Image (cartoon, rainbow, N blue to C red):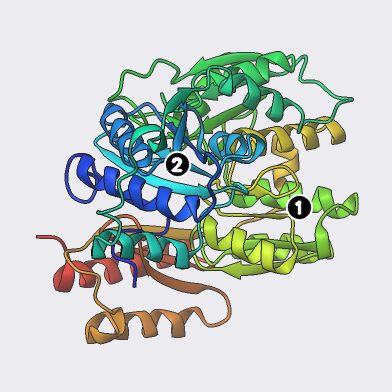
Amino acid sequence: MKKLFGTDGVRGVANVYPMTTEMAMQLGRAAAYIFKGTSRRRHRIVIGKDTRLSGYMLENALVAGICSMGVDVLLVGPLPTPGIANITSSMRADAGVVISASHNAFQDNGIKFFSADGFKLPDNLELKIEKLIETNKIDALRPTATEVGKAFRIDDAAGRYIVFLKNTFPQEMDLSGLTIVLDCANGAAYKVAPAVFEELGAEVIPLGVKPNGTNINAGCGSMHPSVISDAVKQHRADIGIALDGDADRVIVCDEFGNEVDGDHIMAICATDMISRKLLRKKTLVATVMSNMGLDIALRKADGKIIKTDVGDRYVVEAMRKGGYNLGGEQSGHMIFLDYNTTGDGILSALQLLAVMRRKEKPLSELAEIMIPLPQVLCNVRVREKRDITTIPDVAAAIRDVESKLGNEGRVLIRYSGTEPLLRVMIEGQDKYEITTWANEICDLVKKHIGEK
């Protein structure tokens, strides 16, 4: 069992264990040791971050740890998580590090790693890093003199990533004539995202592009889609695009301000790819959180869905193992494996815009391809992540709801991999009924293991 790493790296309140400078330096030393191996050549690790105030101290600690093991550092500054994955692979670096807590509030931060090929680390490598820290095995390894690492700043990293993104959009198309409301969540994409869409010809109305270190995700971005909804209606825009703090996910809204989530975007893109014989094995990879309406939409298009545990890393693992090229989550993480190795909010938005251009249809019409079943999701903050089946009241309530739903819905109970939360999700035909049942289950959970 991993102790430090969750479903998306190490995460927590900045300056509180495990997100301390001491731990950041240890993570840097352990990662450098693993990626350096036994080769005698100079090794390089890319470090990027979002716009959180605590990013500065964690960045410096990571640099110190990595350089102390004789590995050089390439600093790219604020850049979306997928941009760091892209820079890592394109520059032939040995690894990449992202300092970000994604959609969390500014006081949180996180550290996650990419291997040389731009993919997130498998569980066994994360466990190896933890073991090195726990055993102090590498404490005595101290390169000296010319063997100590150096840090370099890559000033054109943002420009490289912008060019990469534009090249994923069809060469024969542009975005001229489109008005786009773009919310960058005061996060890592605040510079690159507006540039991409503007250079492709769109009129961009930018929001959330004035980060100050503490306003990342604050009432903006993909966690607050009402912001782009209101702005789209105000400016009569064609589409609203909302990214999260590290821009690896995207939520959009149509020209009427209606939210279009990750499931809808995957339905639109997957069915388009099936029609053009581009979706490998006619298969989409999604998670257990995706709405059953997505399954129905794919079946109608002669496609199918494979479901994984929640977390984009598990989606990517299934894609690589099965040879699939499109996958994602309802939350807006989407992986277009033909282009990038991880979820990329800007890239996903570009692929959606390409379908709009190709079919010459507004987003509202394209979104009709999927009719979602009513779905309710509620979260309970917990003091411990106890096995729900060992709590009789809760287990009995879940069985009762499952019996009432039969084959016309489902119940999904899971703990968050990054926060002390239990998530209760119910799908069914009647929104009022499933809301009532979800609240009843949540109340029982609060009674037994709720945060005091």
Helix, strand or loop status at disc 2: strand
Locate the N terminus and report the quarter of the image it occupies: bottom left
Identify which residue, 442 or 381, lies in the foreground: 381
Query: Measuring 31% from the left and 18% from the top, which residue is drawn there?
Result: 212
Name the side, left or right, on which 397 lies relative to 368: left
Is 446 displayed left or right of 3 in the figure? left
Please name whichever residue, 4 or 346, is drawn nearer the observer in this view of the structure: 4
Where is mark 2, residue-wise?
97
Query: Residue 428, image x and y in percent?
Result: 51, 68
Give the number of callouts: 2
Quarter assignment of residue 290: bottom right
Among the two numbered marks 1 and 2 on one chain, the one whose residue lies closer to the N terminus: 2
Q: Label 1, on which residue?
A: 270
Q: How crowded is mark 1: few (under 14 residues within 10 Å), some or many (20 or more)?
A: many
Q: Which residue shows up at 28% across the image and 65% down it?
A: 3
- What amino acid is at disc 1? Ala
In the image, is 169 to the left or to the right of 212?
right
Give the CA separation, mark 1 to mark 2: 31 Å
Does 447 sit above or below residue 186?
below
Helix, strand or loop at label 1? It is helix
Where in the figure is residue 448, as x and y percent of width and height? 15, 74
Q: Most extreme residue toward the front, as rendered?
A: 145
Report the residue that reaches farthest toward the left.
452
Q: Which residue is drawn at 61% across and 58% down?
A: 316
